[in-house]
Image (tube, rainbow, N blue to C red):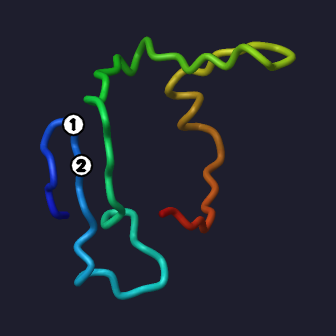
Amino acid sequence: MIIRQKEPVNLETPMDQVHLFLTPAELFYVRNHFSAPTLEADSYQLRVEGAVRAPFALTLQQLRNLPAETRVATLE
C-alpha cells in the first residue's frame, strides 16, 4: 500500500498490483478523517437504537458469530 498519511491512516492502492476486475481486500484503499478508536473487546457493544422497533445491543463476539456475506460493490 502507498502511505499517503500515517495518522489518521490514509493508504492508496498501488495500481500496478491490481490485475483483476475485483480489488483484493489487502489492496483496498483506506481513507480516514479521524484516528481509529481503541476498543476493549471484552466490554464492547454495538447498540442499535433510534428508528427501530426494538433497540438492542450486540457484543463483539456476537457480531463475529453472525454469518458473513460477500458482495460486489462499486466505490468511487
Q: Is residue 40 left or right of residue 62?
A: left
Q: Position of residue 43 (x, y in %)?
A: 43, 12
Q: How many residues crowd around disc 2 within 10 Å: few (fewer than 14), some, or many (20 or more)?
A: some
Q: Is residue 55 above or below residue 28?
A: above
Number of numbered discs visible in the structure rendering: 2
Callout 2 touching callout 1 (CB < 8 Å): yes
Tell me what residue is drawn at x 64 percent, y 56 percent: 69
The residue to which callout 2 is attached is 10
Please name whichever residue, 28 or 67, is drawn nearer the observer in this view of the structure.
Answer: 28
Which residue is at 70% across, 15% downward?
49
Q: Is residue 33 left or right of residue 20?
A: left
Residue type of the residue flagged with mark 2: Asn
Percent from the top left, x then y, of residue 20? 42, 86
Q: Identify the residue shown where x is 64% and y is 40%.
A: 66
Q: Which residue of the protein is positioned furthest toward the right in this rendering? A: 53
Q: Is residue 18 above or below residue 35?
A: below
Q: Which mark is residue 8?
A: 1
What residue type is disc 1 on?
A: Pro
Crowd around label 1: few <14 · some 14–19 · many ≥20 (10 Å): some
The image shows residue 35 at horizontal and vertical percentages of 25, 29
Residue 57: x and y, percent? 64, 16
